[in-house]
Image: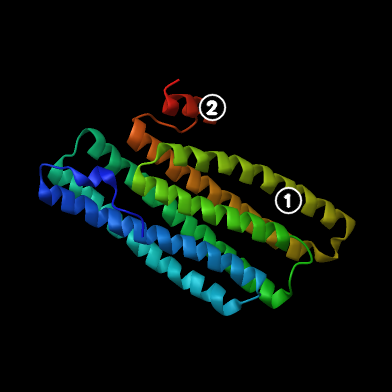
Amino acid sequence: MSPQNPVLSHHISSQFNENLQDVNTKFMTMGGLVEQQVANAVRSLLDTDANLATTVQEEDGVVNRLESEIDEALTLILARRHPAASDLRMVIAMSKANTDLERIGDEAAKIARIAKSLCEEGESPRGYVETRHIGNQVRLMIREALDAFARLDAEQALRVMMADADIDREYQSATRTLMTYMIEDPRHITRVINVMWVLRALERIGDHARNIAEQVIYMVKGFDARHTSVEEIEEKIQGR
C-alpha cells in the first residue's frame, strides 16, 4: 500500500495524528478496492464472465460501507479536533475524494451489470478493443491519483489531470466509430449501445480520478483546481 501521507507525520496531538492515520488507511483501502473493481468489471465484459461480474456488483456494498465509515470518521475529527490550515484542507479533500471513490465503484457495478447482460445476449461485434484500452488507462489514473494523494505530489496529480483529457478524446473517437458502425449495420445496435454505455462509464471514472487529483492540488497548494485549465494549474504548481 502507499506510504504514510506526510501531512500525518507532524502534529502536537498524538491522538489527532492517530485519528487522521486511521481514516487515511481506510481511504487507501477503499481506493485499492475500487481500482480492482474497475479492473474486474472490464475483465468480466471482455472474458464474458458472468460470475466475476456478480462479484463486482456484490463488492459495491463493501465500498458503500467504507464510504459511510470514512464520512463518519471525518465528521468526528472536525467536531472533536477542530483542525486548521493544512490539516483542515486534508480533511475536506479526503471527504470529497471519498465521494469520488464511491462513485467509481458505482460505475464499475454498472459495467458489471452490462457485462452480465451481454453474457446473455451475446458479445458485441465491436468496441471491445477500445474498452480494453480505455479501461487500462482509467485504472492507471485511479492508481496514480491515489499515489499522488498518499505522497502529496502535486506534479503527479497534474499528470493525472492531463491523462483525463486524453481519455476524453479517445472516448469521443470510439463513440463516433461505434455510431458509424451501427448506421452501417443495424443488426447489432442493442449490443453495441451496451458497449457504448460501458465506454461512457469508463470516461466518468476518468473524471472522478481527475477530481481526486484536483483535491491533491488543493491540499498541497491551497487553491481550488476545479474549473481551472491545466495550463493555469501548471503555472501555479511550478510558481511561474
- Residue 12: image quadrant is top left
Please tell me whether residue 3 is drawn above or below residue 96 in the rendered image. Answer: below
The three-letter code of the residue at mark 1 reads: Ala
Which residue is denoted by mark 2 in the rendering?
Answer: 231
> Which residue is pictured at 63% across the width and 59% down the height?
198
Label for residue 227? none
Residue extending farthest to the right is 184
Label for residue 174? 1
User: Is residue 201 something one can see in this rendering?
Assistant: no
Instruction: Assign a secondary structure to mark 1.
Output: helix
Q: Earlier in the sequence, mark 1 or mark 2?
A: 1
> Which residue is pictured at 33% across the width and 61% down the height?
66
Q: Does residue 97 appear left or right of residue 228 in this picture?
A: left
Q: 155 or 53, which is in the foreground?
A: 155
The three-letter code of the residue at mark 2 reads: Glu
Q: What distance separates the C-alpha of mark 1 from that of mark 2?
A: 26 Å
Which image quarter is the N terminus in?
bottom left
> Which residue is pictured at 62% across the width and 46% down the height?
167
Q: Position of residue 166 (x, y in %)?
A: 63, 42
Please tell me whether residue 185 is drawn above or below residue 148 in the rendered image. Answer: below
Q: Position of residue 109 (x, y in %)?
A: 52, 64
Q: 55 or 9, which is in the foreground?
A: 9
Q: Position of residue 140 (x, y in %)?
A: 53, 54
Q: Does residue 209 appear left or right of residue 10 in this picture?
A: right
User: Is residue 107 something one can see in this rendering?
Assistant: yes
